[in-house]
Image (cartoon, rainbow, N blue to C red):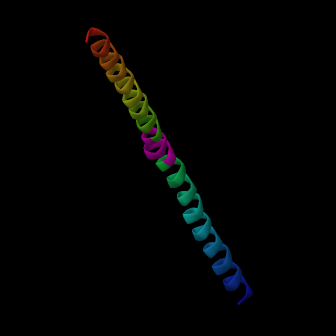
Amino acid sequence: MSNVVALVYYGGMTVLFFFWAYGIVSFVLDVKNKLIPGIRDYREGRKQLKAQAEEEEERESRERQLY
């Protein structure tokens, strides 16, 4: 009886460890493949918006100087 309890206990712990490790690996891959590229795209988009705003400001400044 004691051997069966120990076998069930260690078997259960092994299964739980597998799902725990799988969760950690999935989280790391999600961060690597989704979160980091998303942040990178966001930052590039902000830089593009800033550059467009600067171009617009320069264009408006030149137009004001012409008139």
Give the side of residue 10 with respect to residue 29, left or right.
Answer: right
Q: Which residue is most to the right?
A: 2
Q: Is residue 16 above or below residue 48?
A: below
Q: Residue at (43%, 45%) from the top-left corner?
A: 34
45 to the left or right of 35: left
Q: Would residue 20 appear left or right of 35 to someone viewing this image?
A: right
For residue 14, what is the image quadrant? bottom right
Q: Nearer the viewer, residue 37 or 42?
A: 42
Tell me residue 49's x, y (percent). Answer: 37, 31
Tell me what residue is drawn at x 43 percent, y 42 percent: 38
Of the pair 29 and 41, the residue shown nearer to us: 41
Stretch in magenta:
31-38
Front residue (pair 27, 34)? 34
Q: Residue furthest bottom?
A: 1
Residue 58 lies, with reference to residue 15, above or below; the image says above
Please identify the dominant SS of the magenta region: helix
Residue 3 is a magenta residue = no
Q: Nearer the viewer, residue 3 or 57?
A: 57
Quarter of the image holding residue 2?
bottom right
Quadrant of the rendering where the N terminus is positioned: bottom right
Measuring 54% from the left and 60% from the top, which residue is drawn there? 23
Residue 58 placement: quadrant:
top left
Q: Position of residue 27 (x, y in %)?
A: 52, 53
Q: Quadrant of the C terminus?
A: top left
Residue drawn at (67%, 78%) of the image: 9
Residue sitting farthest toward the top: 66
Question: Along the horizontal axis of the image, is 45 left or right of 36?
Answer: left
Figure disc tally: 0
Q: Is residue 60 above or below residue 32?
A: above
- In the rendered image, residue 64, in percent from the top left (x then y), is placed at 30, 16
